[in-house]
């Protein structure tokens, strides 16, 4: 590696350290929920390796444990992760023009809310391929490593504490949603509308379909009536 | 779902689910790479995509949070309120999650 390339790579690694501290505990919480839902340790880690999107992994575990079928889980995952399309569009535009397609495709796999937030906050001189690679390596390893720790530690944790982990995913969803709401009355109205719709549809059809329909309807109504942007998400791959 | 038979087993249905999730997550991430970042979206499409996480998170929270413990909906509500209060004060996600777990752990430990 050339000196400049190496320096950029390590700068990327360093920029990813705060993300690492965010990812590892959330990954452990995911893995404990997955084990609690009946996943094997290997299945738990495999999902982190292949999907690398925390909220949707939590959601899949939650939906499986309420008896959902596979189709709705995949569809809900698609909807939840569609936001990475926007972030990827931005990152791809910022990477140097000469960046090759294989490097772009590999970088695309590592687009997360966090990585996007860190990368977009960089000065122009840091918007390089080696910098993004360093950032991607440390964040991906944190997520997979945290999942492995949680997957193998679950047997050591008492049942009362494991039961308390059932709230973890909802707490995370709330923590992602709430900070974007103050000062945005239209967005708050949209949340109330979507919550009411979701509760209503939940009585009429299986929970997974109610989730998908109320998400689409909520976002569509919002796109027509509010024109406001969604809250910035933090701490999630 | 029946629990896995051992720590290292991988069931076919879980593997296929993971593969499906992998594809539907990677494709939207990869499309802009193929366009080389030259893609522009209509404003309404951009707004719709921007609002998806907010709507999805809301629908994920309600009414699911009431069923964290189906016999005791207040367990979910208590944890949720703890997380919401801290999130409102702009605490990091991890702090909110740990606080909610802590509140529910105390409730489970000291209440019937």
Image (tube, coloured by chain):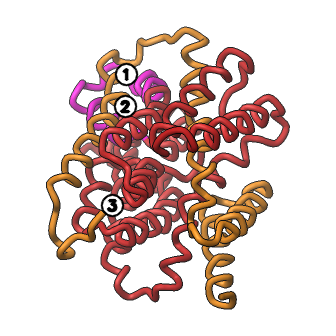
Rendered view: A80 above or below A221? below
Q: Residue at x 27, y 31 (%)?
A: A105
**Disc 1 and disc 3 on one polypeptide chain:** no
Please identify the quadrant where the C terminus of chain B is shown: bottom right
The residue where tag 2 is placed is B29
Q: Are marks 3 and 2 in contact (CB under 8 Å)?
A: no
On screen, residue A182 versus residue A215, left or right, reads: right
The residue where tag 3 is placed is A144
**Snapshot quadrant of residue A185:** top right
Task: Give the letter of the chain under mark 3.
Answer: A
What residue span does the magenta drawing correspond to? A88-111
Work out whether residue A1 can be spotted: yes
Chief SS of the magenta region:
helix
Q: How far apart, in angstroms, are the residues tagged by discs 1 and 2?
A: 7 Å
On screen, residue B55 versus residue A182, left or right, reads: left
In the depicted view, which residue is nearer to us: A164 or A116?
A164
Q: Residues within 10 Å of mark 3 (few under 14, many from 20)?
A: many
Task: Give the letter of the chain under mark 1.
Answer: B
């Amino acid at each position: 590696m050339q000196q400049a390339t190496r320096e950029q790579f390590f700068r990327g690694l360093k920029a990813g350290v705060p993300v690492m501290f965010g990812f590892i505990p959330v990954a452990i919480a995911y893995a404990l929920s997955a084990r609690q839902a009946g996943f094997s340790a290997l299945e738990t880690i495999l999902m982190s390796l292949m999907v690398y999107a925390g909220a949707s992994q939590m959601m899949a575990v939650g939906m499986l444990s309420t008896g959902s079928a596979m189709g709705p889980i995949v569809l809900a995952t698609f909807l939840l992760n569609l936001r990475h399309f926007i972030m990827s569009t931005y990152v791809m535009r910022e990477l140097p023009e000469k960046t090759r397609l294989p490097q772009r495709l590999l970088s695309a796999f590592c687009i997360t809310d966090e990585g996007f937030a860190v990368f977009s906050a960089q000065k122009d001189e840091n918007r390089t391929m080696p910098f993004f690679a360093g950032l991607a390596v440390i964040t991906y390893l944190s997520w997979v490593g945290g999942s492995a720790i949680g997957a193998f530690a679950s047997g050591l944790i008492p049942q009362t504490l494991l039961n308390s982990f059932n709230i973890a995913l909802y707490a995370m969803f709330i923590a992602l949603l709430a900070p974007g709401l103050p000062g945005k009355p239209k967005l708050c109205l949209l949340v109330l509308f979507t919550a009411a719709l979701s509760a209503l549809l939940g009585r009429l059809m299986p929970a997974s379909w109610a989730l998908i329909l109320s998400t689409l309807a909520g976002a569509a109504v919002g796109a027509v009536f509010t024109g406001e942007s969604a809250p910035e998400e933090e701490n999630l791959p | 779902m029946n629990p896995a038979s051992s720590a290292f087993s991988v069931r076919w249905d879980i593997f296929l689910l993971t593969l499906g999730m992998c594809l539907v997550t990677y494709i939207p991430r990869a499309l802009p790479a193929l366009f080389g970042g030259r893609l522009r979206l209509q404003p309404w499409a951009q707004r719709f995509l921007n609002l998806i996480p907010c709507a999805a998170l809301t629908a994920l929270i309600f009414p699911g949070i009431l069923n964290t413990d189906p016999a005791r909906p207040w367990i979910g509500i208590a944890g949720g309120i703890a997380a919401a209060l801290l999130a409102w004060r702009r605490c990091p996600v991890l702090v909110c999650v740990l606080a909610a777990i802590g509140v529910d752990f105390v409730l489970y430990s000291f209440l019937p």
